Amino acid sequence: MQPVTRISLLIYGCSVWLYPSELRKRFGAEMLDVFAELVAQTLAQRGPRGVASLWWITLTESVTVGLSSRLHSTLVIAGVVSFSIASLIAWFFFRSVG
């Protein structure tokens, strides 16, 4: 396993706590396996920049799905979702420009 994959798995393993405990208990090991495969495949196909893009998508999903499902206030959820959508729009814009 390459160092980038090991470091990514370590960080991703820590970020899984953002998801509800029921989901982590049921799918946590599979989430780590799938993420390891994605990192290895992306690294082989697109290099380090591809892994950075994968991380951006992963962090966005962790916040919009994982963290928002743990929050109970609709106001906080609306703010997180709004920020995430704005970030995705900005990312797509700058990716298409650059």
Image: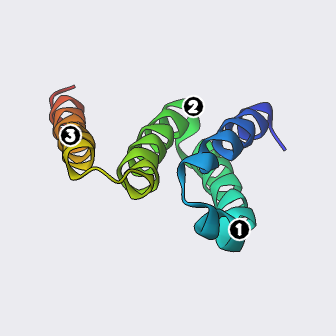
- Identified at 62% across, 61% down, the residue is 21
Dot 3: within a 10 Å radius of its alpha carbon, few (fewer than 14), some, or many (20 or more) residues?
Answer: few
Residue 12 located left or right of residue 29? left
Q: Name the residue type under label 3.
A: Gly
For label 1, the SS is helix
Residue placed most toward the observer, 59 or 1: 59
Q: Quadrant of the N terminus?
A: top right
Residue labelled with disc 1: 25
- Identified at 67% across, 36% down, the residue is 11
Residue placed most toward the observer, 2 or 26: 26
- Farthest right residue? 1
- Identified at 62% across, 48% down, the residue is 17
Asked if the residue under mark 1 is in contact with the one under mark 3, i.e. CB atoms within 8 Å, the reply is no
Residue placed most toward the observer, 74 or 65: 74
Residue labelled with disc 2: 48
Compare marks 3 and 1 and give the one earlier in the sequence: 1
Residue labelled with disc 3: 79
Compare marks 2 and 3 and give the one earlier in the sequence: 2
- Farthest bottom residue? 26
